[in-house]
Image (tube, helix red, strand yellow):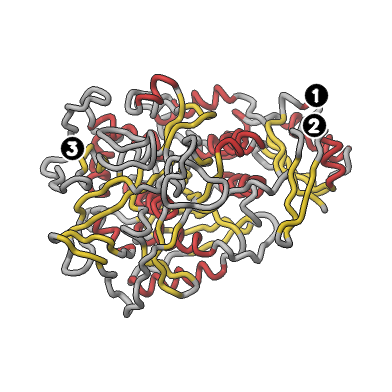
Amino acid sequence: MPLHIVVGLNLRDKTGAKRFVRSQYARGGANLHDWLTPAQFTQKFSATAGQAAAVANYLKQHGFTNVKIEPNRLIVSATGSVSRVEAAFHTSIKGTRVNGKVIYANVEPALAPAKLRGVVAAVLGLQNDLTMHTHNLKSRYQPMTKPAGTPPPCGEVVNGICLLGWYGPPQYQVAYDATCSACSTGKATKIAVMAEGDVSQVETDLRTAETFWKLPKVRFVTRVVGAPSSDTSDIDEWDIDTQISSGIADKLKALYVYAVPSLDDSDITSGYEAWVQDNKTQAGNSSFGEVEAAAFDDGALALDDSIFTEAVTQGMTMFASTGDSGSGCPVELNTGAPVGGTPDVCYPASSPYVVAVGGTTLDTNANGNEPGTYYGEHVWVGTGGGYSAFESAGYWQANGICAVCTTDGIRGAADIAMCADNNGCPMDVFISGVQTGVGGTSLSSPMSMGVWARLETKFNNKLGFAAPVYYGVYGYYEPCPLKSTARVPAGEPGDDTSAAPPDTTAPIGGFNDILFGTNGIPSSAGPGWDEPTGLGTVNYYNMQQDIQNSIFPG
């Protein structure tokens, strides 16, 4: 059985790349909003041409074929037999057949030869046992088929509040204040969905959704990375991602779907590499993840972080879902509730160079028996969130807003949140033509990307990586001492929520600060940044004003 391997190369100047990112995003930075091209990043920070050639030659000497050095010199890929892989990297690979599929893994760590150990960061493709899994959950309440354009109903209305409501993109636009005449759409911005398998039905379903919700038809571009795959087992995921991201953006310049052969780390990394090297979109979305320790152990964490670093220097944002099993990250199935045991976070959401998106339960003011304007939110019990065991906090997070991130220097997730409750505020998604209620952080993450597309268009695609922008807005509008329980957050005049607990939220700039709820011990919401919901959810109208005030003053 031939293996397709991905050999990751270390950045030549990782510290320099980190400093450069700060110079691009910090107020007064020498390179503020001056994005690099892929070629410029390669010249400044990647492995040298000689180092990449040495890795390629080593693989060729050991009988590998299809040896390819990627243009940014972060990856050398190749194909080889199991025996050649074992010999080249001093490891042993064992396999077994489970339900007709061959499952294999290296039982000893892969080792590069001594002459390449300062160059090689990781060798991916040696196992398919622990892989990424998608983050979505079907609602236990499914919508009835309605005529095109019919707003979905509230499952229950109590004292004028829509509870257990279904939502389409137009209803989320209303709830998150994105329908004003001054509100930008995403018409000048291109976004990407990272996907797997055969996505041809995804475009068909998107066209069905656009017609039903009376939304503009978005330009859809499929980018197949690696060998084409006929797998459609996760079509529901890619349907959610494409329909909510384009739907809440209302208009887009283009929607790219990067389709890789599998959710194995090596294929996902190849997808990220293609996204960054193409450099065509302002944002991407990853509605999947794996136990952070697994990504660390096989080297995907280090390699993907290098790719994400390049994306940030190019002014690109990757959004990632934090998971659907509370403060844990399961190996296989989503639970929609805390899994218990030791808290853990999912990767890639734990990377400091992505925007980690958690989830809430959204309640709205009922418009008759339909969802209406924003009422309030609380933590969705199934949302992921916690602290990384391997990643450091970015400078934007280690500035007092996140206490543990500041004192211990570790990465905290989430960064932001949006509606994710599969039973409280699910989206009416068309899956293989059938209306289906779906939620999870696989809803909140692409929703966040769609909101970001609007903001990028508003600011002429000059915002770049969303994390320092969002933390910058939050810090500008939050003048009170960190974690002061007596503080009154500074918000938009007249926007203080009147919602009763647990839906009470507090406005801080363009955020709805989530105050109540938990996703498991010890992760609970409270005033300020918290693990389940980060800075809070985005009020679009306020956010576009507050970015102008705080990031682009004068």
Tell me the CA gap for discs 2 and 1.
Answer: 9 Å
Per the image, label 2 sits on a secondary structure element best described as helix
Crowd tier of the residue under label 3, counting other residues whose Cα lies within 10 Å: few below 14, some 14–19, many 20 or above: many
Tell me the CA gap for discs 3 and 1.
Answer: 57 Å
Residue at position x 23%, y 32% in the image: 477
Mark 1, residue position: 115
Residue at position x 41%, y 44% in the image: 357
For residue 226, what is the image quadrant?
A: bottom right
Q: Nearer the viewer, residue 100 or 8?
A: 100
Residue at position x 74%, y 44% in the image: 105
Tell me the CA gap for discs 2 and 3.
Answer: 56 Å
Contact, CB < 8 Å: mark 2 with mark 1?
yes
| Nearer mark to the viewer, of 2 and 1 | 1
Tag 3: residue type?
Gly
Tag 2: residue type?
Ala
- N-terminal of the two: label 2 or label 3? 2
Mark 2, residue position: 54
Crowd tier of the residue under label 1, counting other residues whose Cα lies within 10 Å: few below 14, some 14–19, many 20 or above: few
Does 288 sit left or right of 33 as displayed? Answer: right
Per the image, label 1 sits on a secondary structure element best described as helix
| Nearer mark to the viewer, of 2 and 3 | 3
Tag 1: residue type?
Lys
Residue 40 visible at all: no
Q: Quadrant of the C terminus?
A: top left
**Farthest-out residue, left:** 494
For residue 179, what is the image quadrant?
A: bottom left
